[in-house]
Image (cartoon, rainbow, N blue to C red):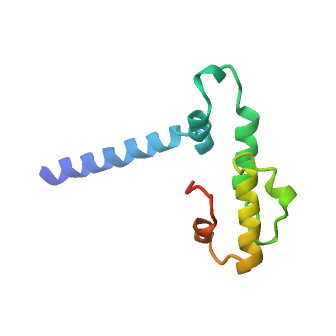
Amino acid sequence: MEKITASVLVSWLFTVTTLTAQNNLTSPWEEVIEQFSSDEDENISWENEIEELDERAANPVNLNGITKEELEQFPFLNDIQIENLLAYLYIHGEMQTVYELQLVEEMDKQ
């Protein structure tokens, strides 16, 4: 009897977890944009920006061959970060992993 109860409980747990995961269809960018938007800007719709960021996440860019103009298209990079990234690539050559971004000055961890 205990084995049946345990099996039912485990099955129920996996079912609830799966259903919860399927209902969470929000973009990971929505949380980031909410953090950056102020209370005054509540009327602004961020749908276009979220769609663009989702598209960029689906089609990653090779940073080793990117230009300044292409980097300027990313709304979360400022001019200093762009210059530092390009300088890092010029001095050290191509990046081997995404973790090298942590070595670029002024680059946020996100």
- Horizontal and vertical percent position of residue 89: 74, 73
Residue at 48 percent of width and 44 percent of height? 21
Give 1 or 63, whichever is nearer the viewer.
63
**x then y, percent, for residue 106:** 62, 58
Q: Position of residue 70 (x, y in %)?
A: 84, 57
Q: Residue at x 55, y 57 (%)?
A: 109
One can see residue 97 in this view: yes
Q: Quadrant of residue 49?
A: top right
Residue 76 or residue 18, whichever sits in front? 76
Question: Would residue 15 appear left or right of 79 to someone viewing this image?
Answer: left
Residue 69 lies left or right of residue 110; in this view the side is: right
The correct choice, above or below, for 85 with respect to 49 in the image is below
Q: Residue at x 20, y 51 (%)?
A: 6
Q: Is residue 98 above or below residue 46?
A: below
Report the quarter where the C terminus lies: bottom right
Residue 31 is situated, as x and y percent measured from the top left of the image, at: 56, 38
Q: Is residue 71 above or below residue 91?
A: above
In the picture, measured across the screen, residue 101 lies left or right of residue 11, that is right
